[in-house]
Amino acid sequence: MALATDDPLSGPGSGDPASGDSTAGAAAPIQGRLARVAGALNAVIPRNPVLRFLLVVLSVPYLVVAVRGFRTDWTPISDIALEMLRMHDVGTRHTPLVGVFSRFGWSHPGPLFMWLDAPALRLFGPSGVLALTALTNLVWLHLAVAGARRLAGDSFAIATTAGVLLMTAATAPVRLAEPWNPWIAVPALLCFLVNVMAFAEKGAWSSAVIAVVAGSFAVQSHVVTGPLVAAGTVGAVVWMWSARPEVRRPLRLTGLVILIGLALWSGPIVQQVRGPDGNLAALVRYSIQGGDLPAPPLHESLGIAARELGPTSPLLGFDETLGPFMRVQELWTLAIVPVLLIALGLLGRRNPVVLRACAFAVLLHSASIFAVTRTTGGFAPYVVRWSWTSALISLVVLAWGAWRAFDDYRSREGDTADSSVRRVPASVATGIAVAVALAAAIPTTAVALRKPVVDHIQLSTAAAGVIAGLESTLPDDQTFNVRWNDAEGYAAVASSVFSHIARSGRTTLFPGSSALAAGPHRAGDDPNAPTLWVIGSFHGWVPPDGAKLLTHWSPLDPAEQKERDRIEAQLRGELGLRPDEPIDVDALVNDPDRSLAALGERLRTLREHGEDYSVFLTPPVADQAP
């Protein structure tokens, strides 16, 4: 059933009662309200059985991950542990007004996702955040499908749902619930793009509100989505002007959307005007001037863009590299998608929606290329994952637009076949969409049921072990300076331990360089406070005089620990290494002399289980002799 053009939330109202029977006049407003409610339900719950089935299929993997995440005893590590720490501040006088910290010396624009997840953290702990993240992602995707249906009916919504399931399948199940800002921005960004298209074409104010909320959430979570949100906004304005230039937007609804936007951005705005070190200004300076790290060569950036946006995108299941380096695609493939979109737009120009959708997709494709070429600090999958939304829009527009062009061609040629024959192509197209959706959803759900729904289990287990060991040894009601000597996972375990200690109510002071990550109120040094050290065994560290060992955790059993310690002592003696110097196992294994290769191989095998971690408490600096 085609969706009504009028927005059920702002479409025709009851109007003035018709003249005549007063009973009919009194009933007219009630009927109008009921019609609006029915229209709103129709916008959310489609009547098309295929679309309803696909929405159920889409929901299954996210619901499985949400339930399993909620039941997982999970200890967050690294960046996510620090995000949890800032979530813990929500509702206090240190409520975060900016987003997650960045390694480039600024924070992402806003704190919406931390504000959203804070109640789940308070009520259910980190596992509650896992579940809420999966459910939030699912809501964004359902709203995206609703926007697609409003834009161009059930056929476009079916194509969008199949594309979303492809994106879900290309995303590891552990990413469906992981509350890390590069991942959570992607579903919200897709929701924004589809709903801003729906608003531009249909004037649906509910879609406008959804677009403002979703776009704000995406940009505040990960600033790299900003260019695509800006391009989508500009494209929507042009689209709206070309689709319905005579329509004047009701002033009160425009004001409502603006007020919603201001409310969503109140935190960053207050932070910007409150002091000289405004984060929004820092972001603008960085975008104009760049940072200390140079952008990669243009040919490399374009090759990455071709890989993510081209016909062999990882979105379609092609070669998702998980390492820090990504395969570069041939540059000429970058032109394939826009050429196809332009050709389809010209071919289907009799259908203005197809033409405008193709033009919008080309704009997004171009904006994505620009954003990728502006990326600094190296490429990794998480850095460019947002680009999948642009690739998905192009894919859906091409598939749906090709079908519309074919259907229009049959109508122009005067197809005289009976209705049952004419339905065959539509049934085939629907069957293909359903087959794609099931082929994507079933393996994803199977993996989500069979494997853990959290990542970095080894480091998370280590952090949990260290935290458990500190329960009975860490002094209460005391201020601590915190430091670490652990490069494994970028001090993943240390971040987790100190975040947990701070969330337990103890005053914890991080180094000044961690002010953005842990919060400015936790940055500094107290010379009268002792220092907590988290030490990873791989890197060598000698405790200073007066240090007290609070806990030690090892992934090895006692016999394996004894063997490892014996091998390390022998290697230090052979190599003349001090106790605080790390042992380079890879150099030993690859040494042409091979005299110590066997010991190196065995040590590497033992280390594959992970590091030992020790926590020391050192006396206050003020108590130490000069």
Image: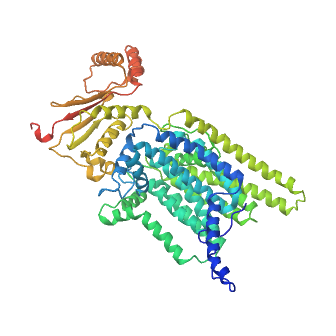
Work out whether 325 lies above or below 245.
above
Work out whether 224 lies above or below 600.
below
Q: Residue furthest front?
A: 23
Viewer-side residue, 108 vs 306: 108
Q: Is residue 591 visible?
A: no
Q: Is residue 565 visible?
A: yes
Name which quarter of the figure residue 15 lies in.
bottom right
Residue 297, image x and y in percent? Answer: 49, 47
Q: Residue furthest left?
A: 625
What residue appears at the point 39 percent right and 32 percent down from the top-left corner?
461
Residue 469, image x and y in percent? Answer: 29, 31
What residue appears at the point 65 percent right and 61 percent down from the top-left corner?
42
Viewer-side residue, 601 vs 516: 516
Q: Residue furthest bottom?
A: 19
Left or right of 437 on screen, residue 115 = left
Name which quarter of the figure residue 360 lies in.
bottom right
Q: Which quadrant would the N terminus be assigned to in this image?
A: bottom right
What residue appears at the point 41 percent right and 45 percent down from the top-left corner?
124
Left or right of 203 on screen, residue 428 = right
Task: Specify the color scheme.
Answer: rainbow
Left or right of 200 on screen, residue 619 = left
Viewer-side residue, 89 vs 35: 35
Residue 574, image x and y in percent? Answer: 29, 16
Residue 521, image x and y in percent? Answer: 26, 53
Viewer-side residue, 136 vs 371: 136
Q: Which quadrant would the C terminus be assigned to in this image?
A: top left
Work out whether 113 lies above or below 21.
above
Q: State how many labels appear.
A: 0
